[in-house]
Every structure is written in structure tokens, then in C-alpha cells.
């Protein structure tokens, strides 16, 4: 296939121009910065390509307790004062960078389009906190919402998890945990999730350089978060390694074609399908990892927001109440 020789020909014109502008801006690559500097750089850059933020009726910041007593900051978004179903959302950033702020527009957009509540979770970041702290914080947040969501005026019987990139990994792993404890989830919403223990798929080679998420970034993030390579085989980091995925929540995948992570996303979707889990898989052509935060420049991002919101609405409608059993 000719494009394998130059995969950049796969990019849409708009995506090409965004990547060119980034190259010309000639910023120091994240992996050349300390984690603290990288967080600031990511924070400053975030929002640069975002759509206008929808105004919501309810946006509240508070904390929820983790198992070790740490207070996990969260932000609740709700499109109205009704008793809404809830998406618990985990931001991307390689377990090292990213925040509630960097994913604020995406969370507002999902809340607005899906007419649901979104709880964005600021799980602890590496290298200060290494594997499995991010996962434990994420799972503690899911369980907290299941138990206490009603006190916030939410319909916690209709619960979904979601995230992008590393946040997608956390969402997928939380869906596995939820299955293990019998907590029903309506959906796992996964934007280009990391799923594999070691970066050994074809797409990791094809898209290693020049497609936003570069191989040195991945190394940098994972060496901070999970430095012991043998730990990477754990399914909480690599959901593809889960011994059994039967009975996990239905999944929506929004993958980017020109992304080192695309093959593992497809592989995880296949693994779920093989276990008879309902899967809805979209591969957005000609775009790169992280495209969901680029709605101002990239039409596929706006389409992905609509597709994800439709999947959420559908999942929440088909889980009306815990007393109605769906076979």
C-alpha cells in the first residue's frame, strides 16, 4: 500500500495545516520538559483549537474522597436541573499531564449534546503518583457517584464511564472493575484509548513521528507513570490483557486513523465483540490522536462529539431503571 511509505498523505487538508502550524510554532516538545512544565505547556495550548464552550445551567467544583483519604477534585456539569444520568469522565494526558481545565470544553459539549450530567475527575498524576494510583482514583470516583449521585440530584442508576487516551484506558479498566463488582454501567465511551501493554502494533511504527502523539511522548509518559516494564502487563494499564471481558458495559469507540494507538483500539473492540459485548466503533479518517479537542479546526471532532453524544443518549434511554431487566 503506497500510503504506508508516506502515511502523511492520509491526513485531511485541515489536519495537515494544523500539524504544519504546530511544527512552525517550533515549541519545545513536551518530552523535553519536566512534568510540571509539560502540564503548564499543555494547559496553555489547550483550548487553542476548541469550539466555543456551551453555557450550562450547572457547573460545580467539589472533591470526593479516595480510599487513602486524598480529596479528588471533580467538576460536575449538568445541562439542566432535572435528575440526569451521569457520565464519569477521565481526561487524557498520558497519566502525567491534563486536567479538568484542559478538557472543560469537551465535557461541556458532551453534557450539552447528550443532555446528561458529566463528572470530570482530576485523578492524581505521575510521576508524583504512579500506577495504579490514577486507576484507583478513577474507580473510587465511579463508586462514589454510584453511591452518592442521588444526593447531587442525579440519576446514578444510569451511569456511564468515558475518557480520551489515558483517560480512555482508565474508563475501560473501570468498566472491567464495575463488571467484577456487579455495578451496571450503561456505556463505556472511549476516545482513542490506550489498551496495550507494550507499543508493538503496526500503527505504533507507522505513525511514530509527525502525527501529534509521538513515540518519545509515549515513552516519557509511561516511564513517569509505570516505570517497571513488567507492571505494564497489568490489565488496569493494558485492558487488552484482561483475562475475560464478558459482561462488561457496551462500548463506543471513537478512534483516529492516523494515531499510533489506533490498532490497539480496534483490537480491544474486537476482543469485546468476541465476548458478545455490544460495540459501536467509529474510525475518523485522516485525523490524529487528540483530535477531539480540535473542534474549531477539525470537522471530524465536531462529528465525533455528535456521535459520542448520540451513543450516550441511546445507552441512557435503554437503561431506564434498575427494576426493568433487559435480556
Image: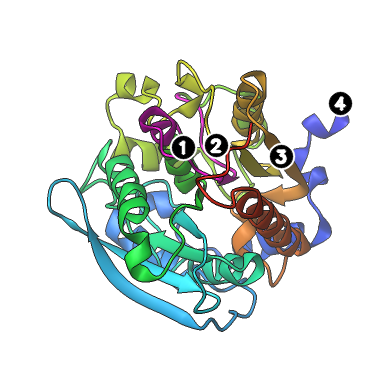
Q: Nearer the viewer, residue 237 or 78?
A: 78
Q: Earlier in the sequence, mark 3 or mark 2?
A: 2
Q: State how far apart marks 3 and 2 are (Cα).
A: 12 Å
Q: Please tell me whether mark 2 or mark 4 is closer to you in this view.
A: 2
Q: Which of marks 1 and 3 is nearer the N terminus?
A: 1
Residue 307 position, x and y percent, is 73, 55
Residue 275 position, x and y percent, is 61, 20
Does residue 219 lie above or below 142 as drawn?
above
Does residue 195 lie above or below 280 as drawn?
above
Q: State how far apart marks 2 and 1 are (Cα).
A: 6 Å
Q: Mark 1 points at which residue?
A: 175
Q: Which label sits on residue 80?
A: none
Confirm or deny contact between disc 2 and disc 1 (CB under 8 A).
yes
Q: Please tell me whether mark 3 or mark 2 is closer to you in this view.
A: 2
Q: Mark 2 points at which residue?
A: 249
Q: State how far apart marks 4 and 1 are (Cα).
A: 37 Å
Residue 192 among those drawn in magenta: yes
Residue drawn at the location 28% of the way across and 41% of the way down: 136
In the rendered view of the protein, which quadrant contains the C terminus?
top right
Q: Please tell me whether mark 4 or mark 1 is closer to you in this view.
A: 1
Label 2 packing within 10 angstroms: few (<14), some (14-19), many (20+): many
Q: Mark 4 points at which residue?
A: 1
Q: Which of marks 4 and 1 is nearer the N terminus?
A: 4
Q: Name the residue under label 3.
A: 280
Q: Earlier in the sequence, mark 4 or mark 3?
A: 4
| Tag 2 secondary structure | loop
Amino acid at each position: 500500500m503506497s500510503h504506508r511509505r508516506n502515511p502523511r498523505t492520509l491526513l485531511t487538508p485541515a489536519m495537515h495545516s494544523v500539524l504544519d502550524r504546530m511544527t512552525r510554532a517550533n515549541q519545545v516538545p513536551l518530552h523535553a520538559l519536566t512534568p510540571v512544565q509539560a502540564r503548564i505547556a499543555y494547559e496553555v495550548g489547550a483550548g487553542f483549537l476548541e469550539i466555543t464552550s456551551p453555557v450550562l445551567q450547572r457547573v460545580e467544583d467539589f472533591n470526593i474522597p479516595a480510599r487513602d483519604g486524598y480529596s479528588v477534585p471533580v467538576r460536575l456539569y449538568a445541562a439542566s436541573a432535572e435528575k440526569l444520568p451521569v457520565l464519569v469522565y477521565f481526561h487524557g494526558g498520558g497519566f502525567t499531564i491534563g486536567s479538568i481545565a484542559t478538557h472543560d470544553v469537551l465535557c461541556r459539549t458532551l453534557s450539552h449534546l447528550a443532555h446528561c450530567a458529566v463528572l470530570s475527575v482530576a485523578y492524581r498524576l505521575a510521576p508524583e503518583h504512579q500506577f495504579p494510583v490514577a486507576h484507583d482514583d478513577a474507580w473510587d470516583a465511579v463508586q462514589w457517584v454510584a453511591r452518592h449521585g442521588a444526593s447531587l440530584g442525579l440519576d446514578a442508576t444510569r451511569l456511564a464511564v468515558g475518557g480520551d487516551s489515558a483517560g480512555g484506558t482508565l474508563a475501560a479498566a473501570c468498566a472491567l472493575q464495575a463488571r467484577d463488582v456487579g455495578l451496571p454501567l450503561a456505556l463505556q465511551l472511549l476516545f482513542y484509548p490506550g489498551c496495550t501493554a507494550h507499543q508493538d502494533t503496526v500503527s505504533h511504527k507507522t505513525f511514530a513521528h509527525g502525527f501529534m502523539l509521538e513515540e518519545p511522548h509515549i515513552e516519557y509518559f509511561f516511564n513517569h507513570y509505570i516505570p517497571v516494564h513488567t507492571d505494564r502487563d497489568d490489565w488496569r494499564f493494558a485492558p487488552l490483557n484482561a483475562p475475560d471481558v464478558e459482561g462488561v458495559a457496551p462500548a463506543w469507540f471513537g478512534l483516529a486513523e492516523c494515531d499510533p494507538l489506533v490498532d490497539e483500539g480496534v483490537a480491544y473492540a474486537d476482543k469485546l465483540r468476541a465476548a458478545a459485548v455490544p460495540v459501536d466503533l467509529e474510525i475518523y479518517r485522516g485525523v490524529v490522536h487528540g483530535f477531539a479537542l480540535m473542534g474549531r479546526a477539525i470537522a471530524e471532532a465536531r462529528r465525533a462529539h455528535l456521535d459520542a453524544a448520540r451513543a450516550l443518549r441511546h445507552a441512557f434511554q435503554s437503561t431506564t431503571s434498575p427494576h426493568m431487566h433487559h435480556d
